Image: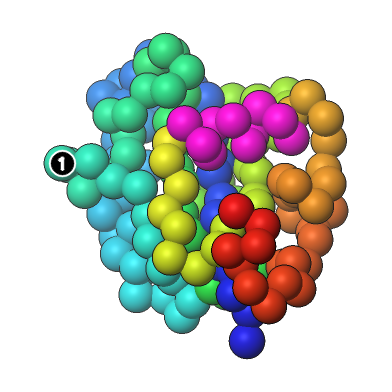
Amino acid sequence: MSNYHLAEINIAKMKGVDINDPIMKEFVDNLDLINTLAEKSEGFVWRLKDDSYNATNLNPYNDEQIIVNVSVWEDIETLEHYMYKTFHSDFLKRRKEWFLKFGKAATAMWWIPKGHIPTLEEAVEKLDYLQQNGPSHLVFDFKNKFSAPEFKDVSAIE
């Protein structure tokens, strides 16, 4: 059993001027359903949310067109299952209807000690690092996955 969980951030640049743009309506109308599906999925640990039950009002990039999602999962496999084998995959396939091509890494993953909850700032730093330096054991993407560290005592690496 691993002493680690998988943290992930993904960002997207909306076609709409902001989340209330009519072009975003179908996406927004299904956001609670998709978030609830995540929370009920095997391997789900935590997700970033604000008072509106989602993270669409958070704006770490000072850009009303960028939305951000941060979550924690038991491992890569359970995150991949949620993303590609549930109703979520329908929205992934249709993302071009709502989102622009970002041009650089839009998803980053990294291993965290169990019990640690990543801050939005930490997640943004990880994505920035991946965009600037490429994948490594520190932060990676779905094309370049790294397994969890094998330390027996997580306090030894903190």
- Which residue appears at 52% of the width and 25% of the height? 13
Say whether residue 105 is magenta: no
Q: Write down the region rendered in magenta.
A: 121-130
Secondary structure found at label 1: loop
Q: Residue 145: x, y in percent?
A: 79, 59
Residue 108: give x, y in percent of width and height: 65, 44
Q: Position of residue 104 (x, y in %)?
A: 73, 27
Q: Is residue 142 left or right of residue 133?
A: left
* Label 1 CA crowd tier, 10 Å (few <14, some 14–19, many 20+): few
Q: Decide if residue 89 is on the left or right side of residue 134.
A: left
User: Does 129 lie within the magenta span?
Assistant: yes
Q: In this rendering, is residue 92 above or below 155?
A: above
Q: Name the image quarter holding the N terminus.
A: bottom right
Q: Judge by depth and name the residue closer to the eye, 89 or 1.
A: 1
Residue drawn at (59%, 25%) of the image: 100
Residue appearing at x 42%, y 41% in the figure: 119
Quarter location, residue 116: bottom left
- Which residue corresponds to mark 1? 51
